[in-house]
Image (tube, rainbow, N blue to C red):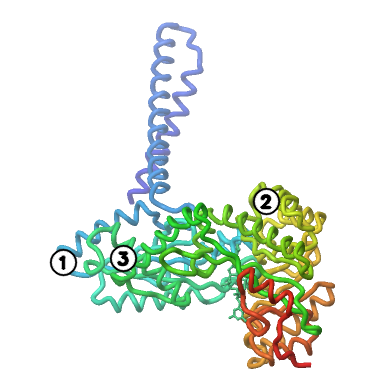
Amino acid sequence: MREKAVDVREGAITTREREIRTAATTQGTSDDRISMLRQANAQLVIATIDAHKLAEQVQTAKIELDHLAHHDVLTGLPNRTLLYDRLAQAITQARRSGKQLAVMFMDLDRFKHINDSLGHTVGDQLLQSMSRRLLGCVRQSDTISRLGGDEFVALLPDIDHPEDAALSAQKMLIAIALPHLINQHDLHIGASIGISIYPEDGLDAETLIKHADTAMFHAKDNGRNTYAFFEQEMTARAMARQSIEASLRLALERQEFVLHYQPKVNLLSGTIVGIETLVRWQHPQRGLLEPAQFVPIAEDSGLILPLGRWVLREACLQTRAWQDAGLPPITVAVNTSAPEFRAGDFLEYLRATLEESRLEPRYLELELTESILMRDAASADSVLHALADLGVKLAVDDFGTGYSSLSYLQQFPINTLKIDQSFVSRITRNPDDAAIVSAVINMAKALRLRVIAEGVETAEQAAFLLAQHCDEGQGYFFGRPVGAEALAILLQTGVSPALPH
Ligand code: C2E
Ligand code: MG
Ligand code: MG
C-alpha cells in the first residue's frame, strides 16, 4: 500500500516536471517580464526537484555505507564491528535475564594451503560456500560473522547450557566437512572451533572473543576438525606462544640455534648420499626445542627470514668444512619455507652464501613444499629455473600431502620427490598406502625424477621400498638427526642398519 502511494507521487512529479521543463525552455513573446518570471519560477522548481532527488541519493548512499561499515563484502555476513555491537547487546540482556550466551571462534584448517595452491578466487568462493553452510546451522536470532581471512565467529545469544553450544559446533563441523564443489575442485576442508561462555569465561565482548580464540588454538592442537571449550589453563599456553615469539628474536642474536643432520641413504648400496639439515633451538629455559614448536611461529612473525638465512649459511659452511677435511662429498638439503622462497633477495643471498662458503652449487639441495610451487606458479617458475641454472638441486618435500597438479612436475626443473612419511609409515599395514607409494615411485621414474622415502623406521619398510625400486630412504631406521660431530663420524663409518637384501 505504501509502495503504491510512493509510485503515484513519483509519477506525478515526473509528469509535472516535464511540464515545467517545457515551460522553462519556451520563450514568451507577449510579455517578456512575465515570461522571465515564469522561467525563473520554473528553474526554481527544477532545482527543488533536483535537490529532492539528490537528498534521496544521499540517503540511499548512507544506507549502503552503513551496510558496508557493518558487513563483510565477500560473504555479506556481519563484520567485526557489528559482531561487537550485537555481543555487547546480548551481554546486557543475558545479565538482566540471568541467562548464558556462547561465543564460538572458528578457523578453517589448512585454508591457507588451499588459497596458496589453488588461488584466491577459489579461496573466496570457498569462504562464500562456508558462510552459507554456517548460516544453515543456526537459529534466526544467532549471528554468524566473519572477522576476516578464514576466521568466523558465531554468537548464540541465548543458551540454556554450554552443551547447546557443543551441539551447534558439532552441526557446523559436519556441515563444513561435506565436500565443496568449486571450479571443478571437490574441496574438503575442516575447521577448529573454540567456545567461550558468558558469564563463566568472561564478562565483556573482548574477553569472550579472546578466550574463544584461545580455545580454538587448543582445538587445532587436538588434531583439528574439532571443538574445545575455553579453560583457564589455556591462557598460560597462549602466553607461552607469545613468549616464544619474543624470545625467538633474541635467540637469533644469542645464537641459540643448532643444526642437526639426518642421513639419506641409497637403498641398494646402503651408502650415505646426502643429509637433511634440521634446525633445533637450544632454549635457555625450555631445553632443546623441535621445529614444530617454533618454525610455524617464526613463519607467522616473519622471523623465518633471518632464521632461514642463518640455517642456509651454516649448512653450506659445515658441508664445505667436511669436504675440506677429506670426508666423502655429499649433498646437503635445506628446508625452505614459503616466505623465504618469496623474499625478493632470496636468489641473491643464496648466490652470495655459496660463494662465501665455496660450496659447489651441485652439493646444495632445497626442499620445497608443494604449496610453494603451486602458488603463483609464474614467479615460482622463474626462481626455480634460476636455481637450476645455478646448479642447485630441487626437491619436493612431503610429496602427496598437498594439492598439486602433476603437470608442474614436468614444468619445473625438479630433481627429487620426497614421499611423505605418513604414507611410508603405513606401507606394510595398509594396502592403499602401499599402492600410493608404488604409484609415486613409478611416476617419478617415468618423469626421470629421483625418489626418496621419508620416515623409514623398520627393516620391512626398507625392504618394501627396495622391492619397488625406490632410490633412497631417510628415517630412524638409517639414522636419527644428529649434531655435526656425530654426523662427521657417520660419514666416515657409514650407517649400519641391518639392510635386507
Ligand atoms: P621435514 O622436512 O619433512 O623433515 C623430516 C622430519 O621428520 C624431521 O622432523 C625429522 O626429524 C623427522 N623424521 C625423520 N625420520 C623419521 C622417522 O623415521 N620417523 C619419524 N616419525 N620422524 C622422522 P623435525 O626435525 O622435527 O622437523 C620437522 C619439520 O620442520 C621438517 O619437516 C621441516 O618442514 C621443518 N624444518 C626443520 N628444519 C627447518 C629449517 O631449517 N627451516 C625450515 N623452514 N623448516 C624446517
Ligand atoms: Mg624436509
Ligand atoms: Mg618431509
- Whether label 2 touches label 1, CB < 8 Å: no
Find residue 241 and report its horizontal and vertical position in percent: 41, 63
- Examine the rendering and report whether any part of residue 78 can be seen: yes
**What is the spatial separation of the Cα atoms under label 2 and label 1, in whole angstroms?**
60 Å
Camera-side residue: 17 or 95?
95
Relative placement, left or right, of 460 versus 8 is right
Q: Relative to 441, is 233 above or below? A: above
User: Disc 1 residue type?
Assistant: Ser
- Examine the rendering and report whether any part of residue 407 can be seen: no
Upstream in the sequence, badge 2 or badge 3? 3
Q: Which residue is mark 2?
A: 346
Which is in the foreground here, disc 2 or disc 1? 2
**What is the spatial separation of the Cα atoms under label 1 and label 3, in whole angstroms?**
16 Å
Say which quarter of the image contains residue 228.
Answer: bottom left
Question: On residue 141, which mark appears?
Answer: 3
Q: How would you rate the neighbour count of disc 1 (Cα within 10 Å): few for under 14, some for 14-19, many for 20 or more?
A: few
Camera-side residue: 149 or 351?
351
Question: Which type of secondary structure does the marked residue at label 1 adopt?
Answer: helix
Which is in the foreground here, disc 2 or disc 3? 2
- Whether label 1 touches label 3, CB < 8 Å: no
Q: Relative to 97, is 65 above or below? A: above
Q: Where ligand 2 lies, by quadrant?
A: bottom right
User: Disc 3 residue type?
Assistant: Ser
Camera-side residue: 29 or 401?
401
Question: Which type of secondary structure does the marked residue at label 3 adopt?
Answer: loop
Camera-side residue: 35 or 464?
464
Q: Which residue is mark 1?
A: 97
Which is in the foreground here, disc 1 or disc 3? 1
Find residue 212 and report its horizontal and vertical position in percent: 34, 66
Q: Residue at x 48, y 52 (%)?
A: 73
Question: Which type of secondary structure does the marked residue at label 2 adopt?
Answer: helix
Find residue 237 and report its horizontal and vertical position in percent: 37, 67
